[in-house]
Amino acid sequence: MQGEFRALRGALRARAAAFALLGPAAALALGAAAVPVRASEDLFFSELPIVASISRLPQRQADAPSAVTVIDRVTIRASGARTLNDLFRLVPGFQTFAGSDAAARVTYHGVTDEDYSPRVQVLVDGRSLHSPLFQNGMNWSLVPVALEDIERIEVVRGSNTTSYGSNAFLGVINIITVDPELVRGVSVSANAGNQGVRDFALRTGRPLGERGSFRLTVQQNADDGLDERSSTLSDHDWRDRNRSRLLDLRVAWQSDVRDLLELHLGRVESRRLTGRLDEDTGRPRASDPLRDLDEASSWLQLRWLRTLSGTSDFSLRYTYSVDEADSGFVDPTRTAGFRSVDEAGDRGTRHEIEAVNTFLPFSRTRVVWGASWRSDALRSKTMLRDRGSVQRDVGRVFANGEWKPVEWFTANLGASHEYDSIVGAHFAPRASLAVHLNPENTVRLGAARAWRTAATLHYRANHLLSPTRAEWVGNPDLPAERLDSLELGYLGDWRDWRMSLELRVFDERLNDRMIARIRTGEQPAGLDNLPYTVQPVQDLRIRGHELHWKWQPFEGTRIALGHADTRIRSRNTRLGQRLADNPGSNFFTSQPRYVALAERSSPHRATSLMWRQRLPWGLELAVMHYRVGRMKWTRNTEVEAYRRTDLRIARPFAVASQRGELAYTVQSLEGRHAEQRMQRIVDRRHWVSLRLDF
Amino acid sequence: MRELLRTCLLGVLLVFSAIGTPAGALDLALVVSGKGGAYERFAQSLRASLGAGPHRLYDGGNLEEGVAEDVVRRADLVLAGGFPAAEAMLGRSSRPLMAVLISRSQYRALRRSHPDAPFAAIVLDQPPARQLALVHAVLPERNRLGVLYGPDTRDQEREFVALSGKSGMELLGQQVSTPLELTQALERTLEASDALLALADPLLSTPTAARSILLSSYRYRRPVFAWSRAFVDAGALAAVYSGPGDIARDVVDWLAALPAGRLPEPQMRMPRHFGVALNSQVARALNLRVEDAASVLRRLQVEERP
């Protein structure tokens, strides 16, 4: 008997060694093995992996230093959104538009003019999606996560660079994806509808032995984009088209009770039509022909989370990402040697390492502190001509503390110091005080200073049209944008009424707001034309209020109302005023349009309403209604006020162990309107979705 | 009826086998499954709890390093710690035996394989009434309780259902047969309940299953009640559990309650000594106001007083 017992133990050890040697591949093959018999002492006395490590437990909303809107996976599914940016229509103060030849953008409190929304930080499981290639911003046509894989999105409304880095200038979109542990089986889904909607996705997840799990998603989304508003010209036969493909793998491995290792890797590709038609002839322009813009982003992330004790944990994260873009063409009208043009290209890479320690030094104090280092490289034959690969290193240390000396009061204090090899060093502090009048009512007062540095290109660009003529050159002396913000918030959480109300009144001063395409009127040495540069020309004051009200009057009924009232005033900086007085500068000739670009970059009023209703026969209905005031996304375009209603009706079903869902979604029920510029029509789009889970 | 007959027969056997021992004093041999850990803590606690009492405790060794056969042979009663030790001792010795540090389902397995052997057990599983009392003590306002049963614990469902009727709690039971069913079972249960009670089942106790249970519960913002301190450290809200020290005290109590010259009835008993574990960080994250563990324990002890 004893011998048998020893033999069994030996066999178990051998199996464990095989796992260690063969790694996840073997574990994958053995993943569905039956549950091993566990000894009673294992069942009752063995340690288990610490899931509730201190950094993973959510912070109470009433204790948070800023206003946070959470979009959970149920809301994501109910919204019927096909693209990530569409979800932010539901968040007060956020603006977006349907992507077409112009990639979608997401902004908070306006300041819209840049192509890649650089002032709102976007993170997926801690990895920033801002890229050196995409002007230090987020490319919303390269979203590296399928909507079905999102656990929840925490939208921080307000500046928080001390916690999330300098791109968290006006707000943060923090996406947390579904833990591989919670994905089992295989799920296939498809959408088919008008306007070329053809989407396919396959998701799967399995255990990797007793200690790990993985999930894998493969997805392709395609549509015909938007139509062009008919003009005096006959049919241009111009059709937009978008296609994106995604591969996303996440592996979690609990190496022992205190150590969790995570691996993420994936790639997303996008192809869309870009270029312009000549207004006179209706034919593509030689300088901007119709062509494919191919973009791709690949990433690898490794993270180690160690639980040091019940009140302390440590995480170490390494991320490597490569972004590539190609919209190259030959412009025969240019000087020989300068005819090959690829303004969107070529390649940006980022290595980033971050260490964070979260701990409770005392029972009522929580501290998060850490440091990160990242190294960016950018290469572009067109935009960085003769500059080779431009390097940029950014180091950062940060600390945030939450102190709750008594039940009715919470103070948050944070600070970060960032060193940038191109720009220099900046210090950013923030503080907030929350008074909990009772468990249901909290009032919060917050203040923050933040800095946003520009894209590498803005400092180093060298876009030449000939040896002596430049389209765009960098401005090495560009100062960082500075934001000083003040906010007064209120949070009402009436659980008995199943209702919550969140109010935020804000006053933000954004100094040295930079605009990318400014001609100073002064001719740089060695050139015989006036190129565009980036200049800090405006100081903005953004004031307003937002509210978010949620109510569940009945078990099957949920209502969420969001509203934002935003006023932006612009004033020229000293430099801006000098340019505004210089007839040789386009800031002089287009002054009213630049003022409008700043002041109307956010609609004065925007409202969203989401109503979710459980219906008889297992049907689930969601209706989203949006009202958005007129605004401007770019200097030369504008968009009128619009109303939009989206609707989704779904019927989940189960036949034996087979589960799935059949749904019908319609967007823009009212039909034709514009969202980004009047020339692009957003028309009614509808599709049928089928999902089968095996 | 057959069960009753068998119990009577075994009782007679145990009683007869005890004849010849000095009144009230037993020679106990402790044989455990392995070195260190819970076994070591149990042995130390037992030694301390027996103290200067009438019974003598002899070290019968462990399965890893070898069993002291002569000690076992001489003993009036063998105390077997852990399932492997109990199984081994039942196979090689005919001495009366009390199994400890085993689960309820393991007791049943032993009973099945040794239907006529003279043995009793104190299991580690907590009585269903105590588990429900914990939920009620920690979260008195939450009435809908999801209960996860695995293959080894599904036989407890009837007992839980009967008790819930008395306590006014609505139970939403969910049986899980394979690891792949767990995620969906959790979704169904958590969606419809205010809190989740996971029973001590091997299927639910693997590291991946524990992670799955806890991560799902955070997704739905529902607290989890579990069966061990380790589960609470990992992220469950609370648990009632009996540690090796509690079981040792139970053994001593049981021996003390024996009529002189008699050995225990061949039956399974649940622990009477227990502790409460509570994770205050989890309570705070879930926005729950809960009492401290000591207060909850006192309350449960008061409720259990006859």
Image (tube, coloured by chain):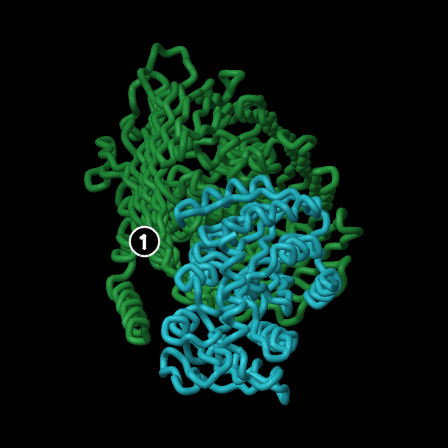
Q: For the view shown, which residue lies furthest in the right direction? A: A437
SS at mark 1?
Answer: loop
Q: For residue A571, which quarter of the picture?
A: top right
Residue furthest to the left: A336
For badge 1, the amino acid type reads Ala
Q: Which of A124 and A550 is in front in this view?
A: A550
Could you tell me residue A578's position as x and y percent? Answer: 56, 44
Q: In this view, does B256 lie above or below A471?
A: below
Figure quadrant of residue A191? top left
| Residue A513 visible in the shown view | no
The N terminus of chain A: image quadrant: bottom left
**Could you tell whether A692 is left or right of B118 in the image?**
left
Q: Where is residue A219 in the image (x, y as percent from the top left)?
A: 33, 37
Q: Colour of chain B?
A: cyan
Q: Report x, y in % for residue B91.
A: 37, 71
Can you identify the residue that label 1 sits on?
A33
| Residue shown at 37% from the left, 55% from the top | A35
Residue plotted at (40% across, 43% down): A145
